[in-house]
Amino acid sequence: MKNLFRLIANFILDIFETLVIALSIFLVVYLFLLQPHQVNGKSMEPNFASGDYVLTDKISYRFGNPQRGDVVVFHAPANANCPQGTGCDFIKRIIALPNETIEVKNGNFYVNSQLLDEDYINPSMSTDAGEYTRSHLITLKSDEYFVSGDNRPYSSDSRAWGPINKSAIVGKAFFRYWPPESMGAIKSAEYSL
């Protein structure tokens, strides 16, 4: 009987140790390497639909800088009107980089006075200026990024509330894992600038 009790106790202890190790690994990965995010809303259509799940790489921007065309997840700025206490994150595409100029005119983005050719959006879609970009050229500071949703009429982005700081970026969205038919790596857009 004593041996049976010892076997059961050892079995329970082994299960507990395995769970603690698995939880520790999960926490390290979640806090420092990768984080799942759900896309909510229409702002990134047609490239991302509401309900899509993506994995965000939280480490690569510690060793390098975000690039134009990267799809990033970031903490929403205070003036983005997120519900209080939600700690909401946004997913958008980087349009302009630190120290660049950006302007919205003729229904398009112009970066450093050059038209930004965006083949990932519907060609008939017009990019309207928001409150922040209305009728003036913006020069980004050394730690600022200008971000925008791919579905411009339904996107609250830098056109409305200004650029984001690098410190607000959670990471780069690099893999869509839901829905299964859309599963795969997320590619950055490429530009001729």
Image (spheres, rainbow, N blue to C red):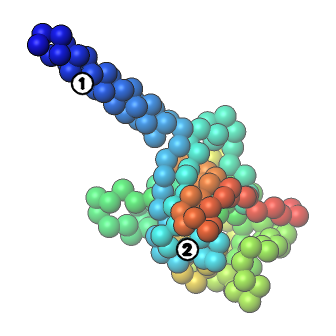
Residue in front for this viewpoint, 107 or 3 = 3
In the drawing, does residue 110 fall left or right of residue 162?
Answer: right
Amino acid tagged 2: Ala
Residue placed furthest toward the right:
192
Residue 173, position as x, y percentages in the image = 60, 54
As helix, strand or loop, the secondary structure at mark 2 comes to loop
Residue 100 sits in quarter = bottom right
Residue placed furthest toward the left:
1
Residue in front for this viewpoint, 9 or 48 = 9
In the drawing, does residue 12 fall left or right of residue 79?
Answer: left
- In terms of sequence position, does the residue under pointer 2 or pointer 1 come before the other? 1
Residue 153, position as x, y percentages in the image = 58, 84
Disc 2 marks which residue? 49
In three-dimensional space, the C-alpha distance between marks 2 and 1, rounded to whole angstroms, equals 44 Å
- Vertically, is 90 above or below 125? above
Quarter of the figure that contains the C terminus: bottom right
Residue 85, position as x, y percentages in the image = 28, 58
Residue 136 sits in quarter = bottom right
Give the residue displayed 40% in from the left and 60% down from the top.
88
Residue placed furthest toward the top:
2
Disc 1 marks which residue? 12
Amino acid tagged 1: Ile
Quarter of the figure that contains the N terminus: top left
Residue in front for this viewpoint, 188 or 15 = 15
Q: Nearer the viewer, mark 2 or mark 1?
A: 1
Residue placed furthest toward the bottom:
124
